[in-house]
Amino acid sequence: MTEAAPHPVLVAPSLLAADFTRLAGEVAAVEAAGADWLHLDIMDGHFVPNISFGPAVVKALRPLTRIPFDVHLMIAPADPYLAAFAEAGAQWISLHPEAGPHLHRSLQTIRGLGCKAGVVLNPGTPAEAVAPVLDQIDLVLVMTVNPGFGGQSFLESQLPKIAALRRMIDDSGRDIRLQIDGGVTARTAPLCIAAGADVLVAGTAFFGAPDRAAAVAALRGGAA
Ligand code: DX5
Ligand code: ZN
Protein backbone atom coordinates (compact mmCIF):
# COMPACT_ATOMS: atom_id res chain seq x y z
CA MET A 1 0.00 0.00 0.00
CA THR A 2 1.15 3.52 -0.74
CA GLU A 3 0.27 6.48 1.38
CA ALA A 4 -1.74 9.36 -0.05
CA ALA A 5 0.37 12.12 -1.57
CA PRO A 6 0.76 14.98 0.92
CA HIS A 7 0.35 17.71 -1.70
CA PRO A 8 -2.44 18.47 -4.14
CA VAL A 9 -1.56 17.19 -7.62
CA LEU A 10 0.04 19.85 -9.80
CA VAL A 11 0.16 19.83 -13.60
CA ALA A 12 3.22 21.12 -15.47
CA PRO A 13 2.76 21.30 -19.26
CA SER A 14 6.01 20.70 -21.18
CA LEU A 15 6.71 23.43 -23.71
CA LEU A 16 8.52 20.89 -25.89
CA ALA A 17 5.14 19.92 -27.40
CA ALA A 18 4.05 23.52 -28.03
CA ASP A 19 3.83 25.29 -31.39
CA PHE A 20 7.26 26.93 -31.54
CA THR A 21 6.06 29.51 -34.09
CA ARG A 22 3.88 31.08 -31.42
CA LEU A 23 5.50 30.45 -28.06
CA ALA A 24 4.04 33.54 -26.38
CA GLY A 25 0.50 32.39 -27.08
CA GLU A 26 1.30 28.88 -25.95
CA VAL A 27 2.68 30.11 -22.62
CA ALA A 28 -0.42 32.23 -22.10
CA ALA A 29 -2.54 29.17 -22.82
CA VAL A 30 -0.78 27.21 -20.09
CA GLU A 31 -1.80 29.73 -17.46
CA ALA A 32 -5.28 30.21 -18.94
CA ALA A 33 -5.90 26.46 -18.81
CA GLY A 34 -5.29 26.42 -15.06
CA ALA A 35 -1.97 24.59 -15.13
CA ASP A 36 0.41 25.09 -12.21
CA TRP A 37 3.97 25.20 -13.58
CA LEU A 38 5.60 25.49 -17.01
CA HIS A 39 8.05 22.62 -17.64
CA LEU A 40 11.00 23.63 -19.83
CA ASP A 41 13.07 20.80 -21.34
CA ILE A 42 16.66 21.79 -22.02
CA MET A 43 18.47 19.34 -24.35
CA ASP A 44 22.02 19.55 -25.67
CA GLY A 45 22.30 16.84 -28.33
CA HIS A 46 24.97 15.19 -26.17
CA PHE A 47 23.39 14.04 -22.91
CA VAL A 48 20.24 13.23 -24.90
CA PRO A 49 19.89 12.74 -28.66
CA ASN A 50 17.94 15.94 -29.29
CA ILE A 51 18.44 19.71 -29.06
CA SER A 52 15.72 22.05 -27.78
CA PHE A 53 16.38 25.60 -26.53
CA GLY A 54 18.49 27.42 -23.96
CA PRO A 55 18.41 30.15 -21.33
CA ALA A 56 17.73 32.97 -23.81
CA VAL A 57 14.35 31.45 -24.66
CA VAL A 58 13.55 30.88 -20.98
CA LYS A 59 14.41 34.52 -20.25
CA ALA A 60 12.28 35.80 -23.13
CA LEU A 61 9.24 33.85 -21.93
CA ARG A 62 9.59 34.70 -18.23
CA PRO A 63 7.72 38.06 -18.34
CA LEU A 64 4.74 36.48 -20.13
CA THR A 65 3.30 34.57 -17.17
CA ARG A 66 3.41 34.41 -13.40
CA ILE A 67 3.41 30.62 -13.06
CA PRO A 68 6.66 29.01 -11.85
CA PHE A 69 9.22 27.91 -14.44
CA ASP A 70 10.35 24.31 -13.92
CA VAL A 71 13.61 23.78 -15.84
CA HIS A 72 14.56 20.16 -16.62
CA LEU A 73 18.20 20.06 -17.64
CA MET A 74 19.19 17.25 -20.01
CA ILE A 75 22.66 18.64 -20.57
CA ALA A 76 26.17 17.58 -19.57
CA PRO A 77 27.98 19.27 -18.03
CA ALA A 78 25.18 21.21 -16.31
CA ASP A 79 27.20 23.18 -13.77
CA PRO A 80 28.44 25.90 -16.18
CA TYR A 81 24.85 26.80 -17.08
CA LEU A 82 23.07 26.76 -13.71
CA ALA A 83 23.53 30.49 -13.11
CA ALA A 84 22.25 31.34 -16.60
CA PHE A 85 19.00 29.46 -15.98
CA ALA A 86 18.56 31.03 -12.55
CA GLU A 87 19.13 34.47 -14.04
CA ALA A 88 16.69 33.64 -16.84
CA GLY A 89 13.99 33.28 -14.18
CA ALA A 90 13.77 29.59 -13.32
CA GLN A 91 12.16 28.81 -9.95
CA TRP A 92 12.95 25.07 -10.13
CA ILE A 93 16.07 23.55 -11.70
CA SER A 94 16.45 19.77 -11.96
CA LEU A 95 19.36 17.75 -13.26
CA HIS A 96 20.34 14.14 -13.80
CA PRO A 97 22.97 12.52 -11.53
CA GLU A 98 24.73 11.28 -14.68
CA ALA A 99 25.32 14.88 -15.85
CA GLY A 100 28.39 15.35 -13.71
CA PRO A 101 30.62 13.91 -11.01
CA HIS A 102 29.46 16.14 -8.14
CA LEU A 103 25.69 15.90 -7.74
CA HIS A 104 25.72 17.22 -4.18
CA ARG A 105 27.72 20.28 -5.19
CA SER A 106 25.45 20.96 -8.18
CA LEU A 107 22.39 20.86 -5.93
CA GLN A 108 24.06 23.20 -3.45
CA THR A 109 24.80 25.56 -6.34
CA ILE A 110 21.16 25.56 -7.48
CA ARG A 111 19.92 26.37 -3.99
CA GLY A 112 22.65 28.97 -3.60
CA LEU A 113 21.25 30.69 -6.69
CA GLY A 114 17.90 30.97 -4.91
CA CYS A 115 16.16 28.18 -6.83
CA LYS A 116 14.51 24.94 -5.77
CA ALA A 117 16.66 21.93 -6.64
CA GLY A 118 15.61 18.63 -8.20
CA VAL A 119 17.16 15.30 -9.16
CA VAL A 120 15.93 13.43 -12.24
CA LEU A 121 16.01 9.63 -12.42
CA ASN A 122 16.24 7.96 -15.83
CA PRO A 123 14.32 4.69 -16.25
CA GLY A 124 17.57 2.79 -15.60
CA THR A 125 18.56 4.82 -12.53
CA PRO A 126 17.43 3.43 -9.16
CA ALA A 127 15.49 5.30 -6.48
CA GLU A 128 18.45 4.89 -4.15
CA ALA A 129 20.44 7.41 -6.24
CA VAL A 130 18.68 10.26 -4.41
CA ALA A 131 18.99 8.86 -0.88
CA PRO A 132 22.37 10.51 -0.13
CA VAL A 133 21.13 13.96 -1.23
CA LEU A 134 17.63 14.07 0.25
CA ASP A 135 18.64 17.02 2.41
CA GLN A 136 19.67 18.97 -0.70
CA ILE A 137 16.55 18.58 -2.84
CA ASP A 138 13.05 19.99 -3.16
CA LEU A 139 11.94 17.65 -5.95
CA VAL A 140 12.56 14.19 -7.38
CA LEU A 141 11.59 13.69 -11.03
CA VAL A 142 10.98 10.14 -12.23
CA MET A 143 11.33 9.74 -15.99
CA THR A 144 8.69 7.36 -17.35
CA VAL A 145 10.29 7.48 -20.82
CA ASN A 146 13.91 7.71 -21.88
CA PRO A 147 14.60 11.45 -22.04
CA GLY A 148 15.04 13.25 -25.35
CA PHE A 149 11.66 13.29 -27.06
CA GLY A 150 7.99 13.97 -26.41
CA GLY A 151 5.22 11.64 -27.43
CA GLN A 152 6.72 8.38 -26.19
CA SER A 153 4.85 5.61 -24.39
CA PHE A 154 4.66 5.54 -20.59
CA LEU A 155 6.91 2.93 -18.97
CA GLU A 156 4.78 1.16 -16.38
CA SER A 157 7.96 -0.53 -15.13
CA GLN A 158 8.70 2.72 -13.29
CA LEU A 159 5.62 2.58 -11.02
CA PRO A 160 7.32 0.60 -8.22
CA LYS A 161 10.13 3.18 -8.21
CA ILE A 162 7.60 5.99 -7.82
CA ALA A 163 6.04 4.14 -4.86
CA ALA A 164 9.47 3.52 -3.31
CA LEU A 165 10.31 7.22 -3.60
CA ARG A 166 6.99 8.17 -2.01
CA ARG A 167 7.92 5.99 0.97
CA MET A 168 11.46 7.42 1.06
CA ILE A 169 10.15 11.00 1.00
CA ASP A 170 7.50 10.35 3.63
CA ASP A 171 9.97 8.56 5.88
CA SER A 172 12.35 11.52 5.60
CA GLY A 173 9.68 13.97 6.74
CA ARG A 174 11.04 16.45 4.20
CA ASP A 175 9.05 18.74 1.90
CA ILE A 176 10.00 17.14 -1.43
CA ARG A 177 7.82 17.03 -4.53
CA LEU A 178 7.56 13.79 -6.52
CA GLN A 179 7.24 14.61 -10.22
CA ILE A 180 6.62 12.29 -13.19
CA ASP A 181 7.65 13.05 -16.78
CA GLY A 182 7.01 11.09 -19.96
CA GLY A 183 3.89 9.61 -21.48
CA VAL A 184 1.64 11.08 -18.82
CA THR A 185 -1.95 11.09 -20.09
CA ALA A 186 -5.44 10.89 -18.60
CA ARG A 187 -4.96 7.10 -18.71
CA THR A 188 -1.56 6.96 -17.01
CA ALA A 189 -1.98 9.89 -14.58
CA PRO A 190 -4.09 7.83 -12.15
CA LEU A 191 -1.34 5.20 -12.03
CA CYS A 192 1.21 7.89 -11.13
CA ILE A 193 -1.04 9.46 -8.51
CA ALA A 194 -1.86 6.09 -6.94
CA ALA A 195 1.87 5.40 -6.67
CA GLY A 196 2.39 8.69 -4.84
CA ALA A 197 3.21 11.33 -7.47
CA ASP A 198 2.21 14.92 -6.81
CA VAL A 199 3.46 16.78 -9.93
CA LEU A 200 2.62 15.56 -13.44
CA VAL A 201 4.48 16.80 -16.52
CA ALA A 202 2.46 16.57 -19.73
CA GLY A 203 3.61 17.58 -23.19
CA THR A 204 1.49 15.87 -25.81
CA ALA A 205 -1.45 15.34 -23.45
CA PHE A 206 -1.65 19.11 -22.87
CA PHE A 207 -0.61 20.81 -26.10
CA GLY A 208 -2.26 18.18 -28.27
CA ALA A 209 -5.60 18.41 -26.48
CA PRO A 210 -8.47 20.24 -28.16
CA ASP A 211 -9.60 21.55 -24.75
CA ARG A 212 -6.53 22.28 -22.65
CA ALA A 213 -8.42 23.25 -19.49
CA ALA A 214 -10.22 19.92 -19.66
CA ALA A 215 -6.87 18.19 -20.17
CA VAL A 216 -5.48 19.78 -16.99
CA ALA A 217 -8.57 18.78 -15.04
CA ALA A 218 -8.38 15.23 -16.34
CA LEU A 219 -4.70 14.93 -15.44
CA ARG A 220 -5.10 16.50 -12.01
CA GLY A 221 -8.19 14.56 -11.09
CA GLY A 222 -6.99 11.36 -12.65
CA ALA A 223 -10.20 11.24 -14.69
CA ALA A 224 -10.21 9.02 -17.76
C1 DX5 B 1 11.34 14.15 -22.48
C2 DX5 B 1 10.93 15.39 -21.71
C3 DX5 B 1 9.49 15.47 -21.43
C4 DX5 B 1 8.59 15.51 -22.64
C5 DX5 B 1 7.29 14.89 -22.24
O1 DX5 B 1 12.73 14.07 -22.49
O2 DX5 B 1 11.63 15.44 -20.47
O3 DX5 B 1 9.22 16.58 -20.57
O4 DX5 B 1 8.38 16.81 -23.12
O5 DX5 B 1 6.51 14.75 -23.36
P1 DX5 B 1 5.20 13.81 -23.35
O6 DX5 B 1 4.30 14.29 -22.23
O7 DX5 B 1 4.62 14.00 -24.72
O8 DX5 B 1 5.69 12.41 -23.09
ZN1 ZN C 1 11.04 17.01 -19.02
Image (cartoon, rainbow, N blue to C red):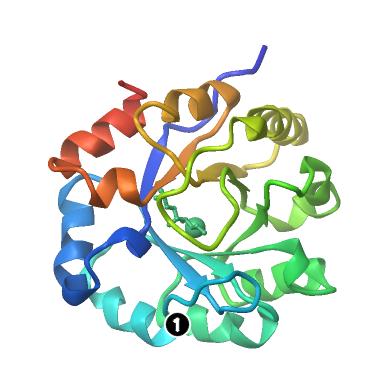
Classify mark 1: helix, strand or loop.
loop
Task: Name the residue: 23% across, 66% down.
Answer: 65
Whole-percent x and y of residue 109?
Answer: 69, 76
**34 displayed left or right of 110:** left
Query: In the image, what residue type sits under mark 1?
Result: Gly
Q: Residue at x 60, y 53 (%)?
A: 146
Q: Is residue 72 left or right of residue 9?
A: right
Q: In the image, residue 96 lies at what x, y percent? A: 69, 63
The residue furthest top is 1
Residue 34 to residue 163: above or below: below
* Label total for image: 1
Query: Which of the 4 quarters of the picture holds residue 195?
Result: top right
Q: Nearer the viewer, residue 142 or 86?
A: 142
Vertical arrangement, residue 166 with respect to residue 66, above or below: above
Asked whether residue 192 appears in the rendered view, the answer is yes
**Residue at the spot x=23%, y=48% of the render?**
208
Residue 69: image quadrant is: bottom left
Query: How many C-alpha atoms fall within 10 Å of the one at disc 1: few (<14), some, or many (≥20)?
Result: some
Query: What x and y, as percent, mark residue 207?
Result: 25, 52
Q: In the rendered view, would you say 84 is above or below 104?
A: below
Q: Position of residue 48 (x, y in %)?
A: 60, 69
Q: Is residue 135 left or right of residue 115?
A: right
Check disc 1 and report the residue beneath it.
Answer: 54
Quadrant of picture, ligand 1: bottom left
Work out which quarter of the rendered image holds the C terminus and state it.
top left
Tell me the residue at 48%/41% (across/down): 153
Visible residue check, residue 36? no
Between 186 and 7, the one lying in front of the other is 186
In the rendered image, the quadrant that contains the N terminus is: top right
